[in-house]
Image: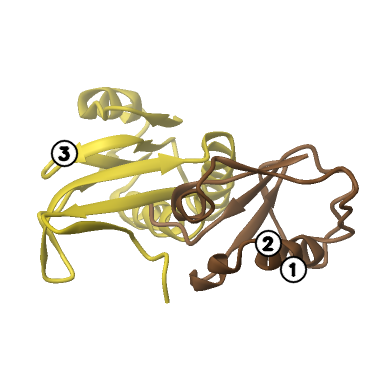
Amino acid sequence: MTIKLFGITREIVGASHIPVPDNQKFNTVADLKTWLYSQYPNLRQLKSIAVAVDHAYAEDHEALGAAKEIALIPPVSGG
Amino acid sequence: MIKIVSHINLSEAYSYLNSPEAGAVNLFVGTVRNNAHGKQVEKLLFEAYEPMAIKEMGKIADHAKEKWSISKLLMVHVVGEKAVGEAVVVTGIASPHRKEAFEATQFLIDELKKSVPIWKKEFYQDGSIWVNAHP
């Protein structure tokens, strides 16, 4: 499993995705965020980070078991 | 019409919207402003999570269609580097009458800015920032 990165999250991490070790399991979006902040503390500098699962925003309590694609969504600024 | 492009074609947008049953066609065009936060902007860079951006724009379009009587609807956003004055986003509505066209067009751009996963980097003479990223 990898986590796609865009914009400032890609610059903070220094890569276009984060590989998740096979032995690392996350039950929920909140678990994933906790792991990410421990691995990449600089992500805490951001105003917010949302998680997208299969191209839709996912709430902290949502399960990740069936996710095919996960991405981090830093604060959007289109338009 | 909902899409992410490298260049906005306004005549294509208008041609798409113009329809016999619609008495009103309203287009909003967002462009690159030459200043931000008191600094001179040299250029912008847009990045999108394209499959999700298309899906999120689709949700906004569905909401708009529930709220107003809409003949045609358009949301187009660019990715890549854009110079001052260039168009970066277009929202547009064709509807029977002007009131719903104005309201729905504004709804589309307001909602796009809130939720669609697109990011803007501003470049100044002395640096650059991802807009809205930091508290």
Mark 3 is surrounded, within 10 Å at the Cα level, by few (under 14), some (14 to 19) or many (20 or more) other residues, namely: some
Separation (CA) of disc 1 from disc 3: 40 Å
Marks 2 and 1: same chain?
A: yes
Q: Which residue is tagged 2? A: A39
Separation (CA) of disc 2 from disc 3: 39 Å
Identity, as a three-letter code, of the amino acid under mark 3: Glu
**Residue at (44, 30) in percent of width and height:** B1
Chain whose colour in the figure is yellow = B
Marks 1 and 3: same chain?
A: no
A31 sits to left or right of A71 = right
**Residue at (46, 61) in percent of width and height:** B114
SS of the residue at dot 1?
A: helix
Comparing labels 1 and 3, the label whose residue is closer to the camera: 1
SS of the residue at dot 2?
A: helix
Q: Is residue B25 visible?
A: no
Q: Are marks 2 and 3 in contact (CB under 8 Å)?
A: no
